[in-house]
Amino acid sequence: MASVCQGSSSLRQHLLIQDFPAAIKEARALLSSSECSLAQARLALQALAQGKDYEAWSREFNKARQRYPELAKDRDALENFAQQILSDGIHHPSITVRAVSILAIGLARDFRLTPLVLSCLSDDSVIVRTLALQVVLQYGSQNLKDAVCKIARHDDSMQVRIMAYQIAAILDIEELLPYLQERANNKLVDGEERREAWKASLMLTPQFLMGSRVKEDMDQALFACELLRHVGEEKDEGVLLDLLSIQYPEVQETALRAVLACGRGVSCESAQIAAQVRHIAQTSSFPKVRLQAAALLYLQGDPLGEELLVQGLLSPFASTCESASAAVCSLGIRGKNLADKYLNAVVSRKAAANLAILLLVSRTNIEKAGDVIASFISDPEMCWAIEQFLWDSQWNPKSASLPLYFDMIKREIGRKLIRLLAVSKYSKVKKVTGDFLSNRQQQGWSFFSGVFWEEGDEQAAETWTTDKSFASKLESTLATLCQKKNNESLRRAMELYPESRWQDKLAILEGIAFSENTEGVDFLLECCYHETPSLRCAAAGALFSLFK
């Protein structure tokens, strides 16, 4: 027994100085001893994992769990192993693997992985750095906040800096505020970056808006409008009047929507606001501005509002028709009567989609609206109602230059519309879903398939069956797994895994992670042993997530 204790102490020393060859030798000797305790087995397995002798780890883990059955789902042993898989992943030469690794680290949400997040923040890939910044939100430690500040100030990619500004605002990193305000006021900085810097600074100090001079900068004026839509009841009527007086269509349109969001105290009861809105409705030469002002008049009960909106909806020009439908949608449930009356009269399919979505959201004339959306789904595209009612701003690859970008967007739009049809209880939703999945199954549709094709899976994706039964089965299986999280739904998901494409496998691994069903441990371990590097990392992240 004394020799085993000495071996355990010696093993700790080898791990402390990272002498892994010696540590592996000690670990094997310790595991082969009949006197090896559960705690010593954990330590020995940790040494094998840190020494990256994964084959030995697998073999010894299976032996040790026979002696100690509780080791089969031992959190420490499994997470030590998964941590090394993720460490390998973030140092892999493939961007695909590094990107999946950092996403898996976000899935894991474990403080021991903070050094790996830090490493990814200095990756040479813009994609990996951007993803790593988003993962920081899952951790939020001070050293990561310091790294976000450094990236915001010094990263050579504008998109990465912008992401750092957004993360800094969400994490309330106030030390970055002076720098953000300097960037926002620097006329030599790109307009998009200035706007995002100003947006972040206002998220950190909303009161700064009231003292700002929005008339002097169109970018700042636009964001001031957006901010006023989301700052609760603390509305400054003077700022709104300033914004409405700016003779710039994008600013006026957004300012009118801000007024609409301010509640009846501003939109319907302020005489100054009402007069300004009526003036815009009567004089603006821009249809989208005129029609948005008309929506406010309609809300106030002014007959001119309905007159202008109806003219817009019946316009033979698609752009005017779309602007009118967007204005009606901005009224929310208060616009449903106009939407119902003119749904079949508009000439633009985007306008029809806007009105139909409003009806579905309002649970009004569901079958008529559902038929319009069912047709729209055959070739979906972004429209105002999707962006405002259904779209998640966090899901946004942000670059039309990415491979398969537009197909990714179409796929996501289709999924959201199908979900809307389902919750609205549209009678033909099953047929619409089957047709959509059948048409899309052969195309790269997930976020990963659109960005990363480095592991030879593009050809494989083209050969998979387009039989809608498989696509429907996969979708329904994942939905059931996320809802029930029981052994039967887990088993069905694992059975689909071998015949799935790379991106489908990622979705299955993520589903297993969120199921929190520890019966999936052995399956995830097999993936860590035998899958491609990116899927190994995804499985490792899922192992962490199972125990959260």
Image: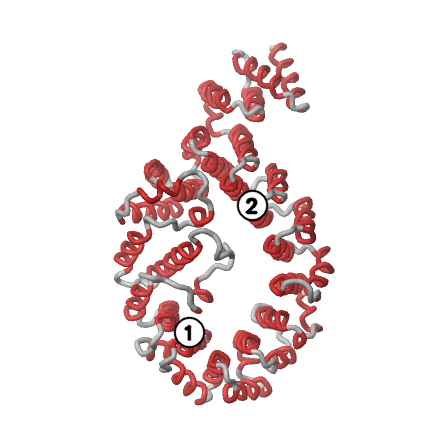
Residue that badge 2 annotates: 128
Amino acid type shown at disc 2 = Val
**Sequence-wise first label, 1 or 2:** 2
Looking at the image, residue 483 sits to the left or right of residue 433; the answer is right
**CA gap, disc 1 and disc 2:** 41 Å
The coloring applied to the image is: secondary structure
Residue 150 location (% of width, % of height) = 69, 49
Residue 65 marker: none
Q: Is residue 395 visible?
A: no
- Residue at image position (55%, 12%) is 35
The N terminus: image quadrant: top right
Assign a secondary structure to mark 1.
helix
Residue 155 location (% of width, % of height) = 65, 50
- Residue at image position (37%, 40%) is 486
Amino acid type shown at disc 1 = Ile
Q: Is residue 321 above or below residue 436?
A: below
Looking at the image, residue 13 sits to the left or right of residue 288; the answer is right
Q: Is residue 433 above or below residue 96?
A: below
- Residue at image position (30%, 54%) is 439
Residue that badge 1 annotates: 333
Q: In the rendered image, which quarter is residue 356 located in?
A: bottom left
Question: Around disc 1, counting alpha carbons within 10 Å, would you say few (fewer than 14), some (14 to 19), or many (20 or more)?
Answer: some
